[in-house]
Image (tube, rainbow, N blue to C red):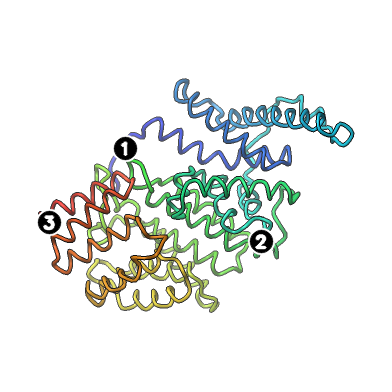
Amino acid sequence: MTGPAEEVPAEARIEDLLRELAPRVLAAVTRRFGRFDLAEDAVQEALLAAVSGWSQDGIPPSPAAWLTTVAVRRMTDMLRSEQARRRREQLDATRRLPESLLGDDSITTADQDDTLVILFLCCHPDVQPASQLTLTLRAVGGLTTAEIARALLVPEATVGQRISRAKQRISQSGARFRLPAPEQRRQRLDVVMQVLYLIFNEGYTASSGTTLQRVELAAEAIRLTRMLREKLPSEPEVGGLLALMLLTHARRRARTGPTGDLIPLAEQDRSRWDRELISEGVALLEDVLPRRRPGPYQLQAAIAAVHAEAERFEDTDWAQIVALYDVLVRMSADPVVRLNSAVAVAMHRGPAAGLELLDSLATDPKLTGHHRLAAVRAHLLEQSGSLDTARQAYLAAAKLTTSAPEQRYLRARAARLV
C-alpha cells in the first residue's frame, strides 16, 4: 500500500497536462493544415498562452479544444502573413490558400491520437539524426530546450539550431502527415526508440526541478512504446525497450521517501516495487531474447531483470550484470553505459577496479562537467576509504546537478563524511 497522495502544485498540474496534450494538438493542427513547421510554432505559442492564462483563470473544461483553437487561430495568422508576403514577392506564382482554411475558426479536434505519426514525421530521413532526435524530444516529449540539452549533453544553442533546421528540412521534403510504410518505419526506428528512451529517462529522473521523478512523463513514454510495439511486434528491440521501461518504472514508489528525498537502489524497500510491471517486463524479455537479435535495449532490460530478481540488494548477481555490461559496452558507444558498467565492476571486483574505469571516462567530452561522473567517483572513493576526497567529490557533484532532490542527497552524503 502507498501513503496518501501528495498535493500537486497547480503549476505542476498545468505543466503535466500541457506535456500530455501538446503532441495531440500538434497532430491535429498538422493534420488540418499540412504544414508541420508552422504548426509546431503555433502550438508552442498556444502552450505559452496556456501557461499564463490557466495559471490565472484555471484549467478550462476542455483544455485540448482550448489549445487547438488558439493554435489554429495562430496558424491561420501565420498562413495569412505568409500568403501576403508571397503576393508581394511573387504575385503570379503565389498559391492561394483555400478560404475555408483562412476563415474557419472552428475547433479541430485533438481527440484522435496521432502522436506516433508526429513521432515518425520528426524522424524523417531527410533530417540529420541529431536534429531528428532534438525535434522529437520537443514535439513529442514536450521537453524544454534546457532539458533536451541536459539529456543529450550538448549546449542549449545547439538544440535551438537543430530544431530550426529539422523543421525546415521536413517542410522542404513535402512529407505527408501519415504513418510511413512498414519498411520506412524500420529505417527510422533507431531514432524513434532513442527518443522514447530519453523521454522516459527524463520522467524517471528529472534533470531539474524540485521533484526526483516526473511520473506522467515516464508513463507517456511507456504508452507510446506500447503503441510502437503494436505496430512493429516482430522487432525485438522495441520489445526490449518496453521491457526496460517497465522493469525500471516498477521501482518508482521505492525511489523517494515521504518528503521526496532520493533513496538509492541499495536502500530501497523492494516490497514497494511493482511486481505486475516486473512480471510483464520479464515476460517481454522471454519473448524477444530467444529471437537471437540482441540489442542495447534488450541487454539493459536483462540487467534490470537481474536487479528485479534479487530479493535484497545483497543478493544481486553482480557477476551476471558485469557480463551483460561487457557485451553492452562493446555494442554501444554511450558513455553513460560505460559509467554504469564501472559501478557494476566496482560492486563485483571492488572500488579500485571501478575507479580505474572512471579514469578512462574523465576526458570524454559528453561527461565533462556532468554530475553523474562526479557522483559515481564520490561513491567509489567512499567505498575505498578515501573519505575526504569522497566528500569533496560529493559536493562537486551537488554543484553540477540542477535537480533539488539530487542536490540534497549528495550534500547529505558529503555531510556524513565530515
Residue 252 horizontal/vertical position (percent) = 35, 52
Sort mark 3 into few (<14), some (14-19) or many (20+) by Cα contacts within 10 Å. Answer: some
Q: Residue at x 59, y 54 (%)?
A: 132
Viewer-proximal residue among 417 and 30: 417
Q: Is residue 224 left or right of residue 418?
A: right
Q: Nearer the viewer, mark 1 or mark 2?
A: 2
Residue marked by disc 2? 185
Mark 1 or mark 3: whose residue is earlier in sequence: 1
Q: Quadrant of residue 357?
A: bottom left
Front tag of 2 and 3 = 3
Mark 1 or 2, nearer chain start: 1
Q: Are marks 1 and 3 in contact (CB under 8 Å)?
A: no
Q: Residue furthest right?
A: 92
Q: Residue furthest top?
A: 57
Name the kind of residue labelled 1 in the image: Glu
How far from the left and from the top, in percent, is residue 355? 26, 70
What's the CA distance linking mark 1 and mark 3? 32 Å
Q: How many marks?
A: 3
Which is more foreground, mark 1 or mark 3? 3
Mark 2 crowd level (few <14, some 14–19, many ≥20, 10 Å Cα):
some
According to the picture, the residue beneath numbered tag 3 turns out to be 417
Disc 2 is placed on an element classified as: helix
Q: From the viewer's perspective, is 82 left or right of 411?
A: right
Q: Position of residue 32 (x, y in %)?
A: 72, 37
Q: Secondary structure at mark 1?
A: loop
- Quick check: 167 left or right of 321? right
- Marks 2 and 3, how far apart in space? 52 Å
- The numbered disc on residue 6 is 1
Which residue occupies the extreme left position in the image?
418
Kindly indicate whether the residue at mark 3 contacts the one at mark 2 (C-beta within 8 angstroms). no
